[in-house]
């Protein structure tokens, strides 16, 4: 706009000059027409020469104006192209600044997200090395073991009860006695080991007790049947095949007395034998049942100690978990806070660099445009000055030529 404003006065001046030249030429033509009747008149020749000089001047002035307009348009186009290039560079520089800032911001956000995920994963409550996970795992294992021991305890109580009933049925039960535990575990694992050892001992003892053959003779009605059969088996041959007179005892000569004596002797013999067998069976059963009773006592004591140890260790683990969990949370919060601080600092640095580069661009390109405007005005001014000088020379030369003519 400044360029068009500067051009308008000069063009107006040129147009006024051309109009004046045309008016002068028209006036000269009118003067020449008045002398057309006399071809030999010297004044006619003068007018003819003046017309020729005016035509040459007009042509030179038109050429000068055309040259000035062409040069001016070329200069304007040249600087417009250069201005467009500078503005394109400015836009490209600003886009590059925005792109780099966007990339840095995205990279900072991604780095923060990845680091936060890593921190949260490492210090997550569900991680295998986290205090809460270890506590929950221990609690689940403890609960499972507790249920398992309770189930085994019920089974062993039934097994001991069955063994006691079997001893009573075989008439070998010696009555309840207080059996003290011989094992005193000092920790949770040792208590479980003692408990399992007692379970194994009870299971093996119960199986061995059930397999005893001699002791079976004294269970239920078997002793009575064995006694009767044995007495009959012994007394019958004696009564049938032994002559009482061989014994030389007069009282035995009586048939009834002999029968009673034979049967009584057989009963006494069977009683003695059965007493010996009962003692042997009872001794063997006691050798098996007493370890069962001892194992049952150890099992009860170990189970009670295990429950005490489990309760105590669970309480300690809970306190330790809460303490370590608080430390993990504090560590996680510190790590996340450091990540936020680093990310914010990186974003702030990126914004600072963006602002600096934007300020540099805003200083650089306007300065380039100002210098461009200065050089353009300088060249246009020089061109206008040269054209003004040329016009003055043409005007002066025409005046001098006309005056001399």
Image: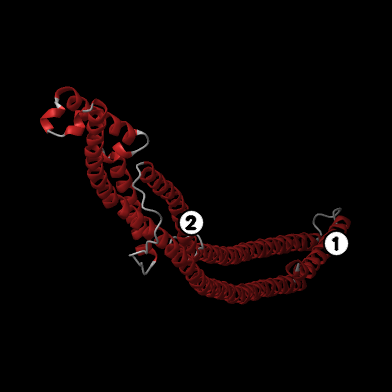
Question: Residues under labels 2 and 1: Cα distance?
Answer: 123 Å
- 281 vs 7, left or right, is left
Residue at 24% over, 37% down:
270
Q: Is residue 10 above or below residue 262?
A: below
The way the protein has been coloured in the rendering is secondary structure
Label 2, on which residue? 143
Residue 155 or residue 111, whichever sits in front = 155
On the image, the x and y values in percent for residue 95 come to 59, 63
Q: Quadrant of residue 191?
A: bottom left
In the depicted structure, whether residue 106 falls above or below residue 232: below
Question: Label 1: how many residues lie within 10 Å, few (<14), some (14-19) or many (20+)?
Answer: few
Q: Quadrant of the N terminus?
A: bottom right
172 shown above or below 389: above
* Residue indicated by mark 1: 23
Which quarter of the figure has residue 226? top left
x and y percent of residue 235 in the render? 22, 29
| Left or right of residue 265: residue 105 | right
Q: Name the foreground residue: 401 vs 104.
A: 104
- Identify which residue is drawn at 36% across, 34% down: 221
């Amino acid at each position: 706009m400044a360029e068009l404003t500067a051009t308008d006065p000069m063009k107006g001046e040129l147009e006024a000059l051309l109009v004046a030249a045309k008016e002068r030429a028209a006036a000269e033509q009118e003067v020449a027409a008045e002398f057309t009747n006399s071809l030999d008149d010297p004044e006619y020749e003068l007018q003819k020469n003046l017309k020729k000089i005016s035509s040459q001047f007009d042509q030179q002035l038109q050429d000068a104006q055309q040259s000035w307009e062409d040069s001016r348009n070329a200069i304007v186009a040249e600087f417009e192209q250069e201005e467009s290039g500078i503005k394109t560079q400015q836009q490209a520089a600003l886009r590059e600044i925005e792109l780099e800032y966007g990339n840095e911001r995205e990279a900072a956000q991604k780095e923060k997200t990845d680091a936060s995920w890593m921190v949260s994963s490492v210090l997550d409550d569900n991680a295998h090395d986290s205090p809460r996970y270890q506590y929950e795992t221990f609690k689940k294992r403890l609960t499972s073991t507790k249920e398992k021991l309770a189930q085994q305890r019920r089974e062993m109580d039934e097994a001991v009860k069955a063994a006691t009933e079997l001893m009573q049925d075989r008439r070998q039960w010696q009555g309840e006695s207080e059996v003290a535990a011989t094992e005193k575990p000092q920790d949770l694992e040792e208590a479980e080991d003692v408990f399992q050892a007692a379970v194994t001992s009870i299971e093996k003892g119960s199986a061995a007790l059930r397999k005893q053959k001699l002791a079976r003779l004294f269970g239920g009605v078997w002793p009575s049947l064995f006694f009767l059969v044995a007495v009959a088996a012994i007394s019958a041959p004696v009564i049938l095949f032994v002559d009482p007179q061989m014994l030389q005892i007069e009282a035995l000569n009586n048939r009834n007395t002999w029968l009673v004596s034979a049967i009584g002797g057989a009963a006494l013999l069977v009683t003695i034998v059965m007493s010996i067998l009962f003692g042997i069976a009872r001794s063997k059963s006691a050798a098996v049942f007493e370890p069962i009773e001892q194992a049952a006592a150890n099992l009860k004591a170990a189970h009670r100690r295990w429950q005490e140890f489990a309760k105590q260790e669970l309480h300690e683990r809970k306190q330790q978990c809460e303490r370590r969990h608080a430390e993990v949370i504090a560590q996680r919060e510190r790590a996340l806070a450091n990540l936020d601080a680093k990310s914010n600092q990186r974003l702030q640095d990126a914004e600072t660099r963006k602002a600096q580069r934007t300020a540099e661009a805003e200083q650089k390109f306007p300065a380039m445009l100002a210098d461009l405007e200065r050089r353009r005005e300088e060249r246009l001014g020089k061109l206008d000055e040269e054209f003004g000088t040329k016009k003055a020379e043409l005007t002066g030369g025409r005046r001098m030529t006309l005056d001399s003519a």
